[in-house]
Amino acid sequence: MRSSLHAGSALHQSKKNPLTLVSSQESVMPIELKEYDPGAFFDEMMVSRNRARPLAKELIGLFRRMDSGELAARQDAADLAIKEMGVTFTVYSEDEGMIDRSWPFDIVPRIIARQEWDRIEAGLKQRVNALNLFIDDLYHEQKIIKDGVFPAEVLAESKNFRPQCVGIDPPLGVWAHICGSDLVRDADGTMYVLEDNLRVPSGVSYMLENRLVTKRVFPELFESYAPLPVADYPTQLYETLAGLSPRNVRRPSVAVLTPGIYNSAYFEHAYLAMEMGAELVEGRDLFVDDDDAVFMRTVSGPKRVDVIYRRIDDEFMDPEAFRDDSILGVPGLMRAWKAGNVGLANAPGAGVADDKVVYAFVPDIIRYYLDEEPGIPNVPTYRCMYPDERAYVLEHLDELVIKPANESGGYGMLIGPRATKAERKTFAGLIKKHPRNYIAQPTLGISTVPTVVGHTLEPRHVDLRPFILSGRKTYVTTGGLTRVALRKGSLVVNSSQGGGSKDTWIVETN
Amino acid sequence: MLSRVAENIYWLARYVERAENTARLVRVNTQLVLDTPSGIKPGWEPLVEITGLHEVFHAVEREPSERNIVRFLIGDANNPGSILSSLAAARENCRTVRDVLPRSSWEAINEFYLYAKENVQTGLTKSGRYDYLDEIIGGSQRIAGLLGSVMFRDEAYHCSRIGRNLERADMTTRIIDVRSTDLFPDDVLESRSLDTLQWISVLRSMSGYQIYRRHVAIRVNRADVLRFLFQDPRYPRSFLHCIETVEESVAELDNKSPVVRRCRTLRRKIRQTEVADLGQASLHEFIDELQIDITALHNAMADAYFPPPLVLEAAN
């Protein structure tokens, strides 16, 4: 009986084309890294042309033994896997409207040594702890202003300070439960914090998916390396959120609040809800009753919600408290939160610390609240609100990167060395008009990682976004999301502007 | 489960089932046309009528030719009922509930949609049509099978089951209707034994031919086929079976539901009708009536379990 079952199996061969690792049409050549030239930049994997850093030696060796056809075939296999897994982000295009794009992924992982990572992790925890103390202080006594460490006028002009939040005590005193901080490495190898995203940072789902894809298309990489696993993030996130529950129940009801399917990060919202076993809700699924408790509309009637991981900006969260034209939000949500009947992550108003001018003060903030030196340095930052710093910026516009205080996604920036005279002139005008709105930083020579380009590897610039969870304890993802600027010479890693990503490995080096 | 999610899962299942049955519909008509002797042209226009899409079709001026109608039913993005639109809608609905469904089902639906989209040009050629439709039917069944084999038997599962079976009941009536429309004068049918050939095509298109032969009768005749397709509780595409399944799943959601009562009434109606006695014209009317009953059943579901439409707009 058994043998006949096996005999029949040949009839059920998959119709899909098997993955051909060597395409016979292409010219087959071993991958040459002699041409690989990171130039003046720090390369994460290569010391110089043709010489790998010790921690990347085996990886680079593996790529070298591969021929160009196989390299391209592996990249194709990864692209196909991502397409089939439906890992997407949504972009808006004038011609096609909303389109769902596959997440661009590069198969060459980026490797960081465990020792270095431990230092970074400690620095991130320190930073986020200080930022939470700072936010809590701003909504209470504002001691940091009274003590002259943080200028009142910066707060007065902050777009993300919410007067509605003054005097509120969120559970555990934590405001920014989920933070995504962007790190970059300069030409001399120093790792800097470039910015802190405290509103609704995204990208963690891609970090998790990238590892799955690497395992699927490149299992042999894991024979010589044992990168530390990343998969416990959803569990940690659930625990952080459950810790905010106002009710003492065994399994608090947690919901992820999404603006809906057309949001660029919708994939992530659904992904995290699914991974946590939480409910994915839209504003219209929720309502607040007369006793200021939050419920969702279910098939079997209203069901109480304890904690909401909201992926909607403050302003759209509750038309009663903020913008009354928002149809994405839930009327009464602020009331419920103030009454302590629902946990919100991040807390409304946490974005006050997500501001490029505030960023410039973070080293002072760390010293003020923790009495410690920052573990990870800030990029030197000129604050245009101060006349002397402004004068320096205006004189050195051709060397600096100018950033508006409250934009994200790489929009509204001026990259001095690449800008035209006219563009610099426009920015000079803007800075003089709204000095508080701009900061300037030197152009960093951000580091590169070998990246598949056609049939070979070329250096491309990368950053790193680890995610930090703050609740009863502080947790940092193992590594984070490495974003890569896929265009040659480009420094813009945002997925909306031609960026992709890489799997990020933290490896033991002993 | 969220009411909105219930609605999305219900529609997800309906759309997948709709794609499958539209493929069956095109397939049966292709067979009918091939079986018809030259000189008598049953044509393709009835299909547009039967799917209730004549307004959409005629919104654009075009010949009701085979080529145009097949394109309209398979790959026209402007036709909300085309196979491709149905699968796109299924995928969108799935995307909004992918946290609730097993991950493999999202991947399957996504892959299925991509297949349908990337191969649609082949599907529109005469030689590629059969294989394409076959893949569509197979793909839908794969998804139904996947959901059936991995889903937890909770409200989400029952909503998908209700959606699938309601759609299937509706489409079964439409497939029967292909044959019931007045394509030929009755005497032409009898004289050329076309009748039998055509009922065989209908059975084949619903994967029911073999079952019918084994369990109902060796000879294919109109009366037995109609009883089989409407009333046989053992055949999973029969109208009765679909309604019984809907009733079962609604009762799992809430056994005092008004929707259960409606199902019961509809079940009684189908059991008590002597379908074999209906002439072509009255059969067509009866089918119309059943389709209205299905719409009413859907509305009752929506009232009881789906979110109120446009709540926010009303509040503003």
Image: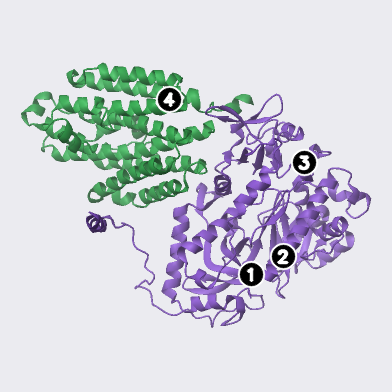
Chain colours: A purple, B green
Q: In the rendering, which numbered label is found on residue A341?
A: none
Horizontal and vertical percent position of residue A382: 82, 62
Indicate which disc, 1 or 3, sits on the residue closer to the N terminus.
Answer: 1
Let me know if residue A48 appears in the view.
yes
Judging by the rendered image, the residue that carries numbered circle 4 is B251
Q: Quadrant of residue B265?
A: top left
Judging by the rendered image, the residue that carries numbered circle 2 is A120
Work out how far the residue at label 1 is from the one at label 4, CA to CA, in angstroms. Answer: 56 Å
Q: Amino acid at mark 4?
A: Ala
Q: Quadrant of the C terminus of chain B?
A: top right
Q: Quadrant of residue A11?
A: bottom left
Q: In the rendering, which numbered label is found on residue A170?
A: 3
Q: Residues within 10 Å of mark 3 (few under 14, many from 20)?
A: some
Q: Nearer the viewer, residue A485 or B307?
A: B307
Observer-side mark, 2 or 4, equals 4
Q: Amino acid at mark 2?
A: Ile
Q: Is residue A499 above or below residue B292?
A: below
In this rendering, position of residue B242 left or right of residue A116: left
Q: Secondary structure at mark 3?
A: loop
